[in-house]
């Protein structure tokens, strides 16, 4: 099973709606809140090349932030990660 990780901070409206979209689609994910973790933020920049939140990473590959997650969903790719009904 694929591992989806959502890197977040606070306050972050896009982080909230990204998590809400994943929950709405019943897609399991791990949230890592980097609000008080400067070393974690630096590692995220090394991993994704981005300094914005949220950052969505699937199996170690960054797909981007909230807008990219929405595009991923609209392309039908997010449904592949939902558990079978």
Image: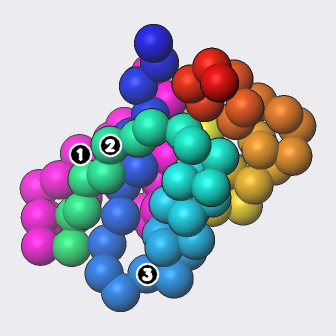
Front tag of 1 and 2: 2
**Residue farthest to the right, as pictured:** 75
In space, the residues marked 2 and 3 are separated at their CA atoms by 17 Å
Mark 1 = which residue? Answer: 43
Q: Nearer the viewer, mark 2 or mark 3?
A: 2
The verdict on residue 56 being magenta is yes
**Residue 11 location in percent, x, y?**
35, 87
Q: Which residue lies under the disc numbered 3?
A: 12
- Image position of 6 (left or right of 56): left
| Looking at the image, residue 37 lies above or below residue 46 | below
Task: Please report the bounds of the magenta region as a residue range.
Answer: 36-59
Asked if one can make out residue 49 in the rendered structure from this viewpoint, the answer is no
Q: Is residue 7 above or below residue 1?
A: below
Look at the image and say whether residue 15 sits in the magenta stretch: no
Earlier along the polypeptide chain: callout 1 or callout 2?
Answer: 2
Mark 1–mark 3 Cα distance, whole angstroms, equals 19 Å
Report helix, strand or loop for mark 3. Answer: loop
Residues packed near mark 1 inside 10 Å, few (<14), some (14 to 19) or many (20 plus):
few
Q: CA–CA distance between discs 1 and 2?
A: 17 Å
As helix, strand or loop, the secondary structure at mark 2 comes to: strand
* Residue under label 2: 30
State left or right for residue 10 relative to residue 78: left
* Viewport quadrant of the N terminus: top left
């Amino acid at each position: 099973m694929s591992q989806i990780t959502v890197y977040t901070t606070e306050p972050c409206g896009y982080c909230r709606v990204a998590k809400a979209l994943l929950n709405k689609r019943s897609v399991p994910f791990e949230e890592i809140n980097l609000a008080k973790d400067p070393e974690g933020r630096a590692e995220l920049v090394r991993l994704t090349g981005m300094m914005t939140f949220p950052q969505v990473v699937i199996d170690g590959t960054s797909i981007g932030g909230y807008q990219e997650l929405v595009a991923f969903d609209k392309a039908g790719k997010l449904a592949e990660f939902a558990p079978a009904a």
